Image (spheres, rainbow, N blue to C red):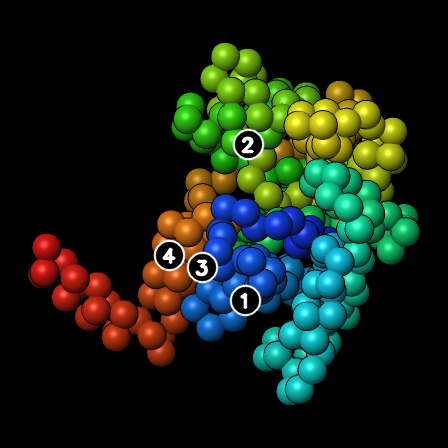
C-alpha cells in the first residue's frame, strides 16, 4: 500500500523536562546536530512520500516553525513540502492536539509523528506502517522494559505473524501491575480519519486529558488497528540525556562529522 501524502506533527507542549533550555526556545526547535527537531521529523516524513505536513503548535510558536521552513533558501530535500500550522490554544493532551487539526486533515488518512522522537539513521518505520495497512490504522510498537510501562501507551496484542500483529486495544501508561503486554506505542502512527471521530467522542482519560491511546483503543476494539513491532528504538530528545545521545548517534551517521567526532569520543575514553 502506498502511504499517505499527509503527515501530522504534534509539536506543542511546554518542554518542562528540558528546562531551562525551553524557557524561551520551543522544544521543537531545539537543535540536534545542525537542524531542529521538527526538521528531522519533516525529513523522515518526506522520505515516506509525504508532501504536506501539519504542525500543531502552542500560541506564539507557529510563526517560528513556519519561518524555519519558508524563509530564505529552501531547505535541501524539502523544497516542495507544503507546511501548515494549527494552533492548540490550550493544552489538553496528545489526543486533543491531534483533534485540533481535524478541519485541516479532513477525510484524509495521515501519518502522525511525535516531534520528541527521532528515528535512527536507516531505521525509518513509516514505510512499514503503510505496508501493513489493510485499510485501517497502524501503530509502531517496541518491546519496552518494565520500568517504561508507566511512561508509554501499551498495546493489547492479538494474533502475530512476524513483526505484524492485530491490536485488540491499548492502555495509557498502565505500569507493571496493569500492563497487558510489553509492547509500547512509540510515537509513529498511520491513522485513518476514524481516529478523529473517536477522539471527538472521548471523555478525558489519564491525567484528565484527551489521550490518543484511548482513541487507538476505540478503533482497535472494532478490528480497525494493526501494529508493527520494530527492533530499533527511536531517539528520545525530550530529555537532556536523550538529546545528548541523539546528537552523538546522528553526528556519527554524517560523513562530514564522523571522523572528528569519533576521534573526540576516543579521546574522552582515554581520559577515563
- Among the two numbered marks 1 and 3 on one chain, the one whose residue lies closer to the N terminus: 1
In space, the residues marked 4 and 3 are separated at their CA atoms by: 16 Å
* Picture layout, residue 128 above or below residue 137: below
- Among the two numbered marks 4 and 3 on one chain, the one whose residue lies closer to the N terminus: 3
* Picture layout, residue 233 above or below residue 257: above
- Along the line of sight, the residue nearer the viewer: 249 or 202: 202
**Mark 4: which secondary structure?**
helix
Q: Residue 152 — which label?
A: 2
Give yes or no for contact between labels 3 and 2 (Cβ–Cβ under 8 Å). Answer: no
Q: Which x, y percent locates residue 106?
A: 90, 51
**What residue do we see at 46% from left, 29% from top?**
148
Give yes or no for contact between labels 4 and 3 (Cβ–Cβ under 8 Å). Answer: no
- Along the line of sight, the residue nearer the viewer: 222 or 17: 17
- Among the two numbered marks 3 and 2 on one chain, the one whose residue lies closer to the N terminus: 3
Viewer-side label of 3, 2: 2
Q: Which residue is mark 4?
A: 244
Q: Which residue is mark 1?
A: 36
In space, the residues marked 4 and 1 are separated at their CA atoms by: 14 Å
In space, the residues marked 3 and 2 are separated at their CA atoms by: 23 Å
**What residue do we see at 58% from left, 63% from top?**
24
Viewer-side label of 2, 4: 4
Left or right, 157 with respect to 244, comes to right
Q: Residue 255, located in which quarter of the rendered image?
A: bottom left
Say which quadrant the C terminus sits in.
Answer: bottom left
Q: Residue 65, located in which quarter of the rendered image?
A: bottom right
* Picture layout, residue 176 above or below residue 31: above
Q: Which residue is mark 3?
A: 121
In space, the residues marked 1 and 2 are separated at their CA atoms by: 24 Å
Amino acid at each position: 500500500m502506498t502511504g499517505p501524502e499527509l503527515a501530522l506533527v504534534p509539536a506543542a507542549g511546554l518542554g518542562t523536562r528540558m528546562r531551562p533550555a525551553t524557557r524561551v526556545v520551543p522544544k521543537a526547535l531545539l537543535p540536534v546536530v545542525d537542524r531542529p527537531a521538527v526538521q528531522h521529523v519533516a525529513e523522515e516524513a518526506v522520505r515516506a512520500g509525504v508532501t504536506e505536513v501539519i504542525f500543531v503548535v502552542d500560541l506564539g510558536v507557529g510563526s517560528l516553525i513556519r519561518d524555519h521552513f519558508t524563509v530564505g533558501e529552501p531547505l535541501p530535500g524539502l523544497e516542495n513540502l507544503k507546511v501548515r500550522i494549527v494552533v492548540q490554544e490550550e493544552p489538553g493532551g496528545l489526543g486533543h492536539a491531534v483533534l485540533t487539526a481535524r478541519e485541516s486533515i479532513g477525510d484524509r488518512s495521515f501519518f502522525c509523528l511525535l516531534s520528541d522522537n527521532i528515528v535512527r539513521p536507516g531505521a525509518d518505520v513509516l514505510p512499514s506502517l503503510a505496508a501493513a495497512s489493510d485499510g485501517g490504522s497502524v501503530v509502531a510498537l517496541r518491546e519496552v522494559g518494565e520500568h517504561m510501562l508507566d511512561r508509554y501507551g501499551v498495546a493489547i496484542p492479538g494474533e502475530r505473524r512476524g513483526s505484524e500483529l492485530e491490536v485488540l486495544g491499548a492502555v495509557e501508561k498502565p505500569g507493571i501491575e496493569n500492563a497487558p503486554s510489553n509492547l509500547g506505542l512509540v510515537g509513529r502512527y498511520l491513522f485513518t480519519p476514524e481516529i478523529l471521530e473517536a477522539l471527538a467522542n472521548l471523555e478525558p482519560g489519564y491525567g484528565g486529558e484527551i489521550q490518543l491511546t484511548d482513541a487507538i483503543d476505540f478503533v482497535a476494539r472494532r478490528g480497525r488497528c494493526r501494529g508493527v513491532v520494530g527492533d530499533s528504538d527511536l531517539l528520545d530528545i525530550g530529555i537532556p540525556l536523550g538529546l545528548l545521545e541523539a546528537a552523538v548517534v546522528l553526528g556519527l551517521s554524517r560523513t562530514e562529522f564522523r571522523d572528528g567526532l569519533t576521534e573526540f569520543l576516543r579521546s574522552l575514553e582515554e581520559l577515563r
